[in-house]
Structures are given as C-alpha cells and as structure tokens.
Image (cartoon, rainbow, N blue to C red):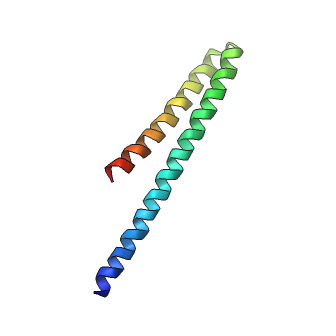
Amino acid sequence: MTGILLASGYMTAITNLKGILLTIGAAIGAVMLVYGGIKFAIAFKQMDQQGEHQAVYAIVAGGVLIGLSALVAALT
C-alpha cells in the first residue's frame, strides 16, 4: 500500500513540474511575440529590411513556443 502512495507522489511531482515548464515555455513565447512585434514596427518605420527579417524570426519562434506548449499540454 505504501508503494502505491509513494509512486503517486512521484507522479504528482512530475506532473506539477511538467505544468510549470509548459507555463514557462508559453510565457517566453508570448514575450518573444511581443518583442518581435515591437522590433518589426521599429524596423518598418526605419525601413530596415534586415531588422524586419530578424523580427519575423522572433515572431515565428514565439509562435512555435506557444504552439508546442499547447500541443504538449493537449497530448498529456
């Protein structure tokens, strides 16, 4: 009986850690989206094509982080 309770304790800890990591990943993705959007607006105003490309990469990376966090959360 004690072994079952001990195993469920480990699973609870792992599940909590997974939730924390997914939340952190989604938050970092959101920050990257906002940062990329601001960076894109500044580069667009200055007509800096290289800055626009870098901003688009940041936006895409943020979207991928948010999407992966959502996908992993939905699958588990």
Count of numbered badges drawn on the protein? 0
Closer to the camera in the image, 73 or 44: 73
Q: Could you say where residue 42 lies in the image, as x and y percent from the top left?
A: 70, 22
Q: Could you say where residue 20 lies in the image, as x and y percent from the top left?
A: 50, 58
The residue at 53%/51% (across/down) is 24
The residue at 52%/36% (across/down) is 62
Quarter of the image that includes the C terminus: bottom left
The residue at 48%/55% (across/down) is 21
Could you tell whether 73 is left or right of 33 in the image? left
The residue at 30%/84% (across/down) is 3
Quarter of the image that includes the N terminus: bottom left
Q: Residue furthest right?
A: 46
Q: Could you say where residue 16 lies in the image, as x and y percent from the top left?
A: 45, 64
In the rendered view, would you say 19 is above or below 46?
below
In the rendered view, would you say 51 is above or below 23?
above
Q: Quadrant of residue 40?
A: top right
Q: Residue furthest top?
A: 47
Could you tell whether 8 is left or right of 17 in the image? left
Could you tell whether 17 is left or right of 49 in the image? left
Q: Residue furthest bottom?
A: 2
Q: Could you say where residue 6 lies in the image, as x and y percent from the top left?
A: 35, 80
